[in-house]
Amino acid sequence: MLASIFSKTRPINYIMLTLLIVTGYSLFIGLDTTIEWTSFEMVKRSCVLLLLLLMMYLSQFIVSRNRLVDDTGYVPLLFTSFLFLFPTSFENVRVIIASYFILLALRRILSLHSLKQSKEKILDASLWICIASLFHFWSILYLILLFYAIAFFGAKDYRNWIIPLIAFFGASILLSLYLLIEEVHFVSWWTDRVQISFDFMYFDNVYQNIALAVFVSVCLLYAVSQALAIKSRPYNMQNTYKKIILSFLIGAAIYVISADKSNGLLVFTFFPLAILGANYIESIPQKWRKEANVYSIFGIGLYFYLMQLIIL
């Protein structure tokens, strides 16, 4: 039944997911006793909730605009399910802000295959990535994805290669001016953020550990199956799906190397993985298998959310 409801994009889909995210976020944050509820904190948390909702809506807009999936609502459903699988992502404000700007960048990068307004798209994507890196430095790795896209869709024009560098230096100059006004040393500001750690012993409870293991299994199922299916895609769309897989790998790399590690860092992988998952579900011929897959992902996310909510 759940797969049937989201087999088409309907207004009811967005209403259901909106209510789910608002309720889930409000409960998890509201029961967090470590938060001191000042007026500023309430505004900040409300803005984070708004960003999460925008990311859910934007995920459907991007895939529909670029025809990355059929006319289904599986992408926002899977995106929401992944959020509930790792509710600690609600607490990491900087990562949510960074992932929102990365999603805006991906919107422009994935549309480069149309070859329309390429320079504007490259500039927009570069700026969004640079802004995201101010909130979580390793978001800068998405420049790899941008240069990969330029190599396939704009390599002949040398100006396309220069635009990201101009955007990077422009953002650096503005940041330098801001730090100068705030009397913060530029180098020390960056060294506090440019750190690498491979310490994965950060789990607060066993449910976070198990949720990560389940998520890795889902990643392998969706990513490997869709990587093998790329050659069956229309030729003009194969490079686009390669960009989606590379985007997922970059998101996973950010989680692996980030110093302030938490399951919330995996939010960078949610959107590309949701696309891969939606394509996997759409490729299943049997209706009962589709339902089983959708119910499993949604049910697992809801279960781990409730377990971590109980032990708050």
Image (spheres, grey):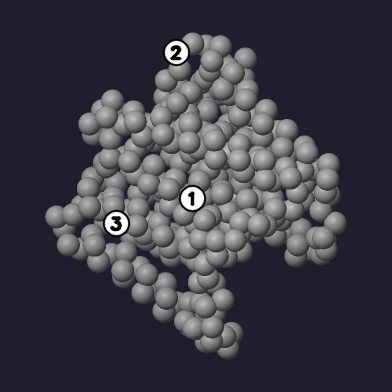
Task: In this rendered view, identify the residue nearer to me: 311 or 76.
Answer: 311
What amino acid type should be assigned to the residue bearing mark 3?
Phe
Image quarter of residue 20: top right
Q: Is residue 47 visible?
A: no
Q: Mark 3 highlights which residue?
A: 147
Q: Mark 2 highlights which residue?
A: 285
Looking at the image, is 221 positioned above or below residue 45? above
Say which quadrant the N terminus sits in. Answer: top right
- What crowding class fits label 2: few (fewer than 14 Cα within 10 Å), some (14-19), or many (20 or more)? few
Task: In this rendered view, identify the residue nearer to me: 181 or 251.
Answer: 251
Helix, strand or loop at mark 3: helix
Decide if residue 274 is on the left or right side of residue 310: left
Q: Position of residue 149 (x, y in %)?
A: 28, 50
Decide if residue 252 is on the left or right side of residue 91: left
For image coordinates 70% across by 60% down, the residue present is: 44
Decide if residue 297 is on the left or right side of residue 62: right
Looking at the image, is 118 positioned above or below residue 227? below
For image coordinates 42% across by 24% down, the residue present is: 70
Q: Which of labels 2 and 1 is toward the front? A: 1
What amino acid type should be assigned to the residue bearing mark 2?
Pro
The label number, if any, that marks residue 252 in the structure image: 1
Task: Measure the C-alpha gap from mark 2 to mark 1.
Answer: 30 Å
